[in-house]
Amino acid sequence: MILGSNGAGKSTIIKSILGLVKPSRGSILFEGEHELTALAPHQIHKLGISWVPEGRQLWGTLTVYDNLRMGGFIEADDAKISQRIGEMLERFPRLAERRDQVAGSLSGGEQQMVALARALVSGPKLILMDEPSLGLAPIVIRDVFELVKEINASGISILMVEQNVRQALKVAKWAYLLEVGRVVENGPSDEIANNESVREIFLGGRH
């Protein structure tokens, strides 16, 4: 998990990993061998890195099913894509009920389910999540973080940027505190949650 105030560079890190922003210096290694700064976004995606973008960014005029198919655009095997979509519809029964409904007509929570399922259709090793709780009702936020825990427990790594620090620290295993593009603190999430500066800035004061 990456913590930081607005403008600290959280989303820039995500976009740099995805190849959407080229860093001026340094390197980004994936699995200890793939230098991501030398690759195009589609090549990075093929390595097993998916993205759940801020605001979900669905194709609002396409159906839920078609949005899920877009998650497997790099996979040439149609049978494999159909199988993965079937698994997602089984995993998210609400989406199965709405598979033929246009995504733009769904609630915010349902759209976030589509965004998560779409990322999973590619069979990722790592999912990057940018503000997954943004604009959602508190009860829906709880459900989203439960899904994050389930996805991680299935063996998929997750790197998350999230303003809802209190909830995010409950599901994260490790956290980084970013200030103006620099990591100033990092450690197990429970230790970061008890860090005085983190508590004062993000968790509403000392306790």
Image: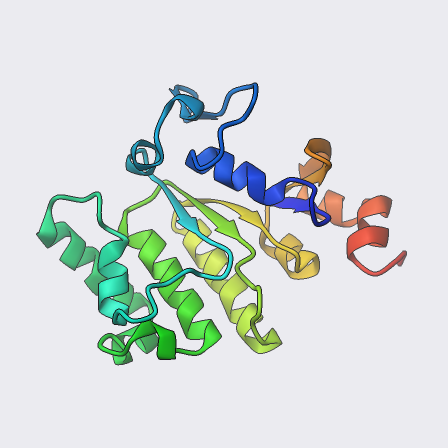
- Quadrant that contains the N terminus: top right
Vertical side of 8 occupied by 94: above or below: below
70 in relation to 12, above or below: below
- Can the viewer see residue 87 in this picture? no
Compared across the picture, whether 171 is left or right of 29 comes to right
Nearest to the observer: residue 206 or residue 164: 164
In the rendered structure, the answer to whether residue 86 lies left or right of residue 16 reads: left
Q: Which image quarter is the C terminus in?
A: bottom right
**Residue at x 57% of width, y 64% of height:** 134
Q: Tell me where residue 92 appears, x and y as whole percent.
A: 33, 70
| Colour scheme | rainbow
Residue 149 as seen in the image, left or right of residue 66: right
* In-front residue for pair 154/120: 120
Position of residue 189 measured from the top left corner of the image (x, y, whole percent): 67, 46
| Residue 192 x/y as whole percent | 74, 44
- How many numbered marks appear? 0
Q: For this rendering, which residue is in front, 175 or 25?
A: 25
Kindly indicate the quadrant of the structure image that contains residue 164: bottom right
Q: Residue at x 21, y 56 (%)?
A: 84
Q: Residue furthest right?
A: 206
Q: Position of residue 10 (x, y in %)?
A: 62, 43
Residue 28 visible to the viewer: yes
Image quadrant in which you'd find residue 18: top left
